Amino acid sequence: METRVYDLKTEYEAGLAHAVRVILSGGVVAFPTETVYGLAANAFDMAAVRRIFEIKGRPADNPLIVHLSGTEDIPLAAKEVPPLARRLFAKFSPGPFTGVLNKQPCIPDIVSAGLPTVGIRIPANEYARELIRRAGVPIAAPSANLSGRPSPTTAEHCIRDLFGKVPVILDGGACSVGVESTVALITGEYPVILRPGGVTREMLALEAGRAEIASGVTEGLSSGEVAASPGMKYRHYSPNADVYIVEGDINTIANKLRTMYDNDIMSGLKPLILCSYDMSLKMEGRAVRTLGRDADEIAKSLFSELRRVDETGYDKVYFEAQPVLGLGLAVMNRAIRAAGFKTI
Ligand code: TXA
Ligand code: MG
């Protein structure tokens, strides 16, 4: 298949028009959002949604988020919108927030992977919202990576994973948040975070009085435990290199990193340290990629840096554990999956 990449800064009208044509004729396109790039299809078109699963190699039991252009469309996808849901959508939409509600029967089961609920999100990215508005249908969209790979935060990442597999990739530049939306069950009295993301636990708690975190978010599920969010049970975001999360206070982490790195070098391996700016200053002369100065910066660069690990051929990656505050919770949720839950 021929893939056309449109730079939305210079080819806005042509790019959107082509993408809308593809979506309305049952095809799939890659598009930018403020969190990560998505792979879009008409949510009402079962064959088109099936294509998304095929292209990504995604397990059929992992539901897709339905994207809308405004809160007024929520009743198209959600059977009822309880007071908490109304309040959280009003506060955090458009934005990196996905509310899980009971679904309308018109949303096909393939979208929700057979669940009675559906995740609903209104992206803040203007290109994304305009695409949805012009398509005039709810858009089912997962992240635009091949299943198991880090999510794409630039059009180049989409090109790597999807060139020849989709007719259109819309290039809207680098994603401003860099990790996916917060997925929260909002049918009850308090939100329950199924996947931490761009809207932090602290923000949700401030608005709702309390926010819970489902089990399996920062640690592995114990065997037999059912994942509240099916996506949480899969190994994900992984480079080919072995990733380890290195925990402790700053000096403990610094000592562990230096020791393990130096031992690897002596064994002829090629290790890499992924860490904050402050930690990088303590790693004198070792191979380091600095992710940023704070959780927001680290979130923005995380997936790009995980992708770069493979391009540069490192054997082992040591990832400095981050405090699980603010976007740090989303960062650690992704990092621990990239590491296959290996911590040191
Ligand atoms: O930021 C985002 O959310 C991006 C952009 C493109 O909007 N999308 C995204 O979609 O990350 P995806 O499919 O890669 O991740 C969706 C996550 C999965 O972990 C899935 O299991 C969970 O949301 N999810 C979707 N619908 C759900 C539901 N009804 N109940 C529980 N979890 C759900
Ligand atoms: Mg994904």
Image (spheres, helix red, strand yellow):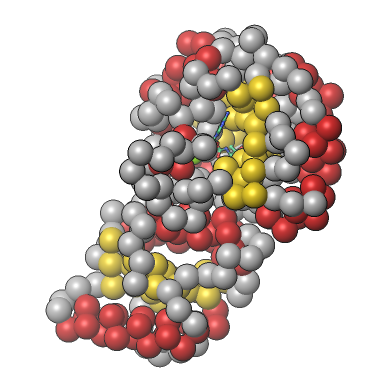
195 up-or-down from 113: above or below:
below
| Quarter of the image that includes the N terminus | top left
In the image, what residue occupies the spot 36% across and 57% down? Answer: 341
Q: Quadrant of ligand 1?
A: top right
Q: Is residue 312 visible?
A: no
Q: Is residue 186 visible?
A: yes
255 up-or-down from 60: above or below:
below
In the image, what residue occupies the spot 28% across and 54% down? Answer: 240
- Residue 49 lies, in percent from the top left, at 50, 18
- Residue 337 lies, in percent from the top left, at 41, 53
Residue lying furthest left? 267
- Give the quarter of the image for residue 326: bottom right
Q: Is residue 66 left or right of residue 253?
A: right
Q: Is residue 129 left or right of residue 316?
A: right
Foreground residue among 325 and 286: 325
In the image, what residue occupies the spot 42% across and 85% down? Answer: 252
- Give the quarter of the image for residue 98: top right
Q: Is residue 265 left or right of residue 235?
A: left
| Quarter of the image that includes the C terminus | bottom left
- Residue 334 lies, in percent from the top left, at 48, 54
190 up-or-down from 131: above or below:
below
Foreground residue among 301 and 66: 66
Query: What count of labels does the image hold?
Result: 0
In the image, what residue occupies the spot 29% across and 73% down? Answer: 271
- Residue 191 lies, in percent from the top left, at 70, 42
